[in-house]
Image: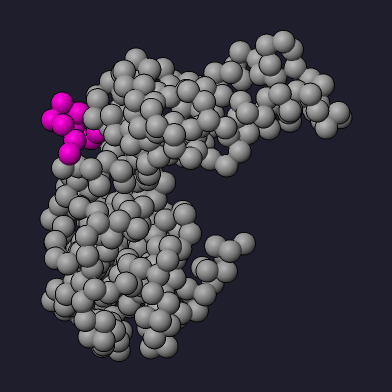
Amino acid sequence: MTTMDPELVKRWRLILGAAAEEKLQGASRLGTHSGLLDEEGRLMDEALAAIYDGTSGIDGGGTGTGIVGRGSRSAGLGASTPKLAKWLGDVRSFFPSDIVSVIQADAVQRKGLTKLLFEPELLSQVKPDIGMVATLMSLRGQIPERTKETARTLVREVVDEIVRRLASDLTRAVTGALNRRKHSPLPSLSGLDWDKTIRSNLKHYDTERKLLIPERVYFFDRVRKSKEWTVILDIDQSGSMANSVIYASIVGSIFASMPSLDTHVVAFDTEVVDLSEACQNDPVDLLFGIQLGGGTDINKSIAYCESFVAEPRKTIFLLVSDLYEGGNRTEMIRRLRDMHESGVRTVCLLALSDDGVPSYDEDVARKLSQYGIPCFGCSPDRLPELIEGALKGMDLQQLADRLKQAKSL
């Protein structure tokens, strides 16, 4: 300990809390009469202590357990808005954005600080992230009227960031897979642009033979048939699927903006909600139309989605679910198998998020895989590759295996 770097000692002090101050200072022979932490360190320590030391609730009372290593102290956020506002400012000033997200989530979950979400002036200082959007969605019925607009602003920031991250790659994947014209060396006579060809070649008119001899022929770009493919997103609203629900809903809105796709977005718990019309408008409205939590009847939702399948071999069905079925499991598996065997490009995404694969029903996933239906977790950034492969007719099981390997690297 005597050779420990001062910065390392400071980090251990922040991790272990005030209870470790004396031992660390003695063992390392560092620090001053005011302790191991400088002014900035003390502010960081106070911000951490408010959540992780032995306090509970928004009033700073109680004896909660805190995280391992940090001893109890009287620090807390108190009930006042100024204290919460200062705490939010300190957290965002002293910690990286990914750490801020974790601390904010812990503030709500460990300390019950729903006041962060119910006061406009506080919510406006919260770092927008997908976890906070999930929390807002789960509490949407409790958010006071005065805070709703601020909540929408926070959600919109996250939605816009995800759209910027995914939209161009998804659009490129779809248009690239469907634009088959580039694979044909022979242009189509039906695509000949007569007007432009004639006007551009008038200077080559042969007056003696009274013939127009074109030097260059112009063709229209291949006009792609509207709604070439049907894409169905069937989304499990279980609380454990929160991040996947958000990503899948936004992906549904991106698909709905593409004229070549007939997009249907369905969300379910024990009931089925068709969000197809909503996804064509504002994705923020779409998210606020989803209710996280509740039971699960996957079979009922698949039965509803079957009505959208007009051309099986021109349909992609993405079930976003952990496969824990509260309805008829045997019939659910049969429906998915029949859908797959009819030619529908059927995939079960156990997760569509950056957080890895959550707990899922391994028995159901194994049975579906035996029928040739891939079941795996997919990060949003790899989804374009999956969609492009499905549209091009690639073997989805092989593609899923490749995506899983890429994710594990």
Kindly tell me whether residue 197 is visible in this rendering: no
Residue 192 as seen in the image, left or right of residue 86:
left
- Report how many numbered discs are placed on residues in the image: 0
In the displayed structure, would residue 47 be above or below residue 69? above
Q: Residue furthest right?
A: 3
Q: Quadrant of the N terminus?
A: top right
Viewer-side residue, 185 vs 213: 185
Q: Residue furthest top?
A: 33
Residue 318 among those drawn in magenta: no
The residue positioned 46% from the left and 53% from the top of the image is 354
Q: Give the image quarter of residue 142.
A: top left
In the displayed structure, would residue 274 be above or below residue 34? below
Q: Position of residue 75 (x, y in %)?
A: 47, 23
Q: Position of residue 103 (x, y in %)?
A: 46, 35
Q: Give the image quarter of residue 241.
A: bottom left
Q: Position of residue 271 (x, y in %)?
A: 14, 65
In the displayed structure, would residue 190 be above or below residue 22? below
In the displayed structure, would residue 381 be above or below residue 163? below
Q: Position of residue 132 (x, y in %)?
A: 35, 40
Segment tinted magenta in the rendering: 142-153
Q: Give the image quarter of residue 360.
A: bottom left
